[in-house]
Amino acid sequence: MDKRNFLYLFYGLSLAWGLVAAYLFVLMQRSRKLRAELDRVKRMVGDQ
Amino acid sequence: MSTMSTRQKLVYGLGATGTLLLIWNLYRVLLVLPDEMQQGAIYRIIYFHVPAAFVGWTLFLAALVASALYLWNKNLALDGFAASAIEVGWVFCSINLVTGMIWARIIWGIWWTWDPRLTSMFICWLLYGGYLVLRGAIDDAGQRATVSAVLAIFAFADVPIVFMAIRWWRTQHPSPVLETGGLAPEMRLPFWLNVFVFLLIGLAITLLRLDQEDTKRELEGLRRHAHAHAI
């Protein structure tokens, strides 16, 4: 491959997939919190 | 023992297929395809920059349809789908903008210019970003869904403008290379394969995000139930 501008291509691809990875990480964290909250509210409703 | 739902199976299936195809296509794009004479390695960013825009627009279109249907039948599941599609579409829209800026830095010598294509895409990014901020600011589920649906329909008006900008105006951004045969034949298959792969991955992430909307609705229902019993 032509090495001209290869560094910028590397930055572009890293940023693109980095954004997807960061978003997936945020999604996972959010899912974990939501499930924990759902369990807590279910227990609370069950107690009433 | 917990079993996988059909949606989860679909997410894993789409994700796995997309990843395998992506690895094979990355190998072709980075190591097999010939270089572009004037741009060097950087031209390969087209295989990510354009598919990201296509996925963003497709998801915004899906959100438009879901939002219009929501206003018609008030089914909150449709609102959840629209919100999921817009959030994922917005991420792909960001990828399009960021990769475009890097490409512009090499080809034009500048990171950004207020050209009709770039400006309309930036407005698109702001509109849908506003949609996501607005959703977080309204507590009542019905009101949030109605206001969001109206905004999703209004925001989509910008998408055809972004798409047509390079046809309607003389812009710094290149004119459409896909329609005018500007892309060499050997570069077309990997390009369209990457569009397909991005669509698979975008759909898988949207379905993953949709799970959260379902959980949120269940949570809101339980909270209402708990509140009513407490009173």
Image (cartoon, rainbow, N blue to C red):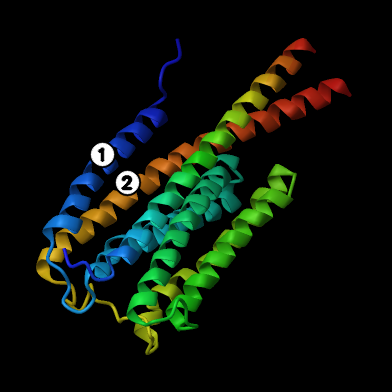
Give the residue pinned by disc 2: B200
Q: Nearer the viewer, residue B172 or B164?
A: B172
Residue B181 image-quadrant placement:
bottom left
Q: Is residue B4 left or right of residue B149?
A: left
- Residue type (three-letter) at the residue carrying disc 1: Thr
Q: Nearer the viewer, residue B30 or B77?
A: B30
- Residue type (three-letter) at the residue carrying disc 2: Leu
**Secondary element at tag 2:** helix
Q: Do callouts 2 and 1 mark residues in contact (Cβ within 8 Å)? A: yes
Instruction: Characterize the local packing of mark 2: few (<14), some (14-19) or many (20 or more) Cα atoms within 10 angstroms.
Output: many
Residue B130 image-quadrant placement:
bottom right
Q: Position of residue B152 (x, y in %)?
A: 57, 59
Q: Position of residue B80 (x, y in %)?
A: 56, 43
Q: Is residue B83 left or right of residue B5?
A: right
Q: Nearer the viewer, residue B151 or B3?
A: B3
**Residue at 28% over, 56% down:** B195
**Residue at 36% over, 81% down:** B173
Give the residue pinned by disc 1: B17
**Residue at 39% over, 65% down:** B99
